[in-house]
Image: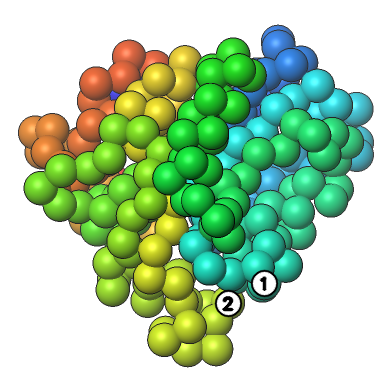
Amino acid sequence: MDVITLKNYEQLSKKAARILAGKIELKPNSVLCLPTGGTPLGMYSRLVDYYEKENISFNKITSFNLDEYIGIKPEHPGSFNKYMYKNLFNHIDIKEGNIYIPNGNAEDLKKECIQYEKDISKAGGIDLLVMGIGENGHLAFLEPGDSIPAWTSVVKLSEHTRIANSSEFENIDLVPKKAITVGIKTILSAKEIILLASGKNKAWAVEKMIKENITPQIPATFLKLHDRATILLDKAAADKI
């Protein structure tokens, strides 16, 4: 696990975008796994700039998402489908057929999870996976607990996570209680991982991720098992290490 501390959020976003752009330049048909949330927004904005101003093409890229809520429509302002198109896909030349986001409205959610793993395998596996970290140490929607799912699964969201993700919903009662998320083995199977953390509210989780032994009570500690995991922090997120 390599830890890199940047001066601020802007520098963090630039570094993350440059790593992704470099991967695309080296391997134009890379398979990416991408996150949602507030932290990646600066990275996505810069990737759009690279596409518009530096002729970096996403035409051969395949993109998988880490997760999606269960029970809301793709066009809902709070859906991760809506987020990805609004902040990235609508502004680059990625092919529609190369975009994979879990279907939280599938009739058979178990079958959807199995198919998602098959799609990742069929694409050749994930070359680069980018993710944030929850304030409670979760990765994707893998919440702390006695155990965490190995592969893409339906999970129950903690109250803490639902509150943290409630900004696009009228009230907390409307935030979905379940989601589809990639599993810890899905994550660790990626050839390369980048974790982004910004702000003092992430400092506790970052400290635990780095200093604690591997435990499902802090899912982020599992990144210690990966030999190509890079942790990008701004100074505020690195405050406790």
The kind of secondary structure element at disc 2 is loop
Quarter of the view holding residue 22: top right
Q: Between residue 103 and residue 1, name the one nearer to us.
A: 103
Task: Please give the residue where the numbered disc 2 appears in the rendered image.
Answer: 168
The N terminus is located in which quarter? Answer: top left
Q: Is residue 103 left or right of residue 227?
A: right
Measuring from the top left, give residue 118's x and y in whole percent. 53, 25
Q: What residue type is labelled 2?
A: Glu
- Counting the numbered discs, the total is 2
Measuring from the top left, give residue 228's x and y in whole percent. 39, 17
Instruction: Measure the alpha-carbon separation of dots 1 and 2.
Output: 9 Å
Task: Please give the residue where the numbered disc 1 appears in the rendered image.
Answer: 76
Q: Is residue 189 left or right of residue 71?
A: left
Q: What residue type is labelled 1?
A: His
Q: Is residue 71 left or right of residue 83?
A: left
Specify the color scheme: rainbow
Quarter of the view holding residue 177: bottom left
Above/below status of 82 relative to 116: below
> Which residue appears at 32% of the width and 14% of the height?
227
The C terminus is located in which quarter? Answer: top left
Residue 234 - label: none
Answer whether labels 1 and 2 touch (C-beta < 8 Å).
yes
